[in-house]
Image: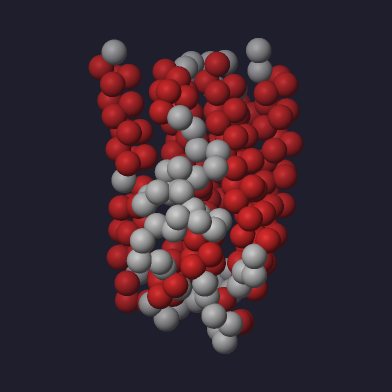
Amino acid sequence: MRRRAVVVVALTLALATAAVGVALAVAATSGTTDAAPSASASPSASSSIPVTADDYCYVEAMIYYRVKEQELAQTLLRKEGIDAGASGFATGIAARNEDELDELREWYVSWVDARPAEPPADGPCGGHGADHAQMPGMPAWSTLQGFVDAQHPDAERRFAEILRDQNAGMVALIALILDGDPHPAVVESADEVLKQAAADERMLEQFLAAVP
């Protein structure tokens, strides 16, 4: 019971302080406010195009989604007797997301002037809350707690279900942003994210079909 309580508290703190984590990541690179992401979707190629609040919404939302994916993957990897396929998938998520987060954090800094003073009430990020915890696809607390408590093979099933729902929510949010007039760098990044999301969806459905 004590181990369960510690893990549950850890997840609570992670969920409640996601925005703080982003801020700390930004603080670590505060000396590079003019830097542009070095990955393929570089805003420096379109520096003359204004960055909007919706563009900044994309960056903040993607940071939150990726951090949540990492937390889920790390929670699964701490469990014993996990299926090798699910463990490998979780390990891959943690590794690839770290690379993507490095790029997103640079955007977060270099596009900070487009950040709205208050959480938007409408638009793609309307109703997401100050820390984006109300974004589409985010699991309820009871769902997270059930995953924390679960063991093999229920843990793999819950992991896949939560990721599947988050994945669908992320795709839905990206669709809203692309329906507007996003920055070319956002369009390029979103295209890559959607390709990865489609591949992840296929993998997660395979997991769910195989797990009792």
Compared with residue 88, is residue 178 higher up or lower down, i.e. above or below? below
Compared with residue 173, is residue 77 higher up or lower down, i.e. above or below? above
Left or right placement of residue 167 versus residue 113 in this view: right
The image quarter containing residue 185 is bottom right
Pick the front one: 23 or 101: 23
Pick the front one: 30 or 62: 62
Pick the front one: 158 or 176: 176
- Identified at 50% across, 38% down, the residue is 138
- Identified at 44% across, 72% down, the residue is 114
Compared with residue 212, is residue 53 higher up or lower down, i.e. above or below? below
The image quarter containing residue 22 is bottom left
Q: Which quarter of the rendering shows the N terminus?
A: top left
Res 25 visible = no
Pick the front one: 82 or 207: 207
- Identified at 73% across, 28% down, the residue is 206
The single residue placed furthest to the left in the displayed view is 2
Compared with residue 112, is residue 125 higher up or lower down, i.e. above or below? above
Q: How is the image coloured?
A: secondary structure
Left or right placement of residue 166 versus residue 117 in this view: right
The image quarter containing residue 71 is top left
Residue 135: give x, y in percent of width and height: 50, 45
The single residue placed furthest to the bottom in the displayed view is 48
- Identified at 59% across, 28% down, the residue is 161
Res 56 visible = yes
Residue 90: give x, y in percent of width and height: 55, 36
Residue 104: give x, y in percent of width and height: 49, 62
Residue 25: give x, y in percent of width and height: 35, 60
Q: Which quarter of the rendering shows the C terminus?
A: top right
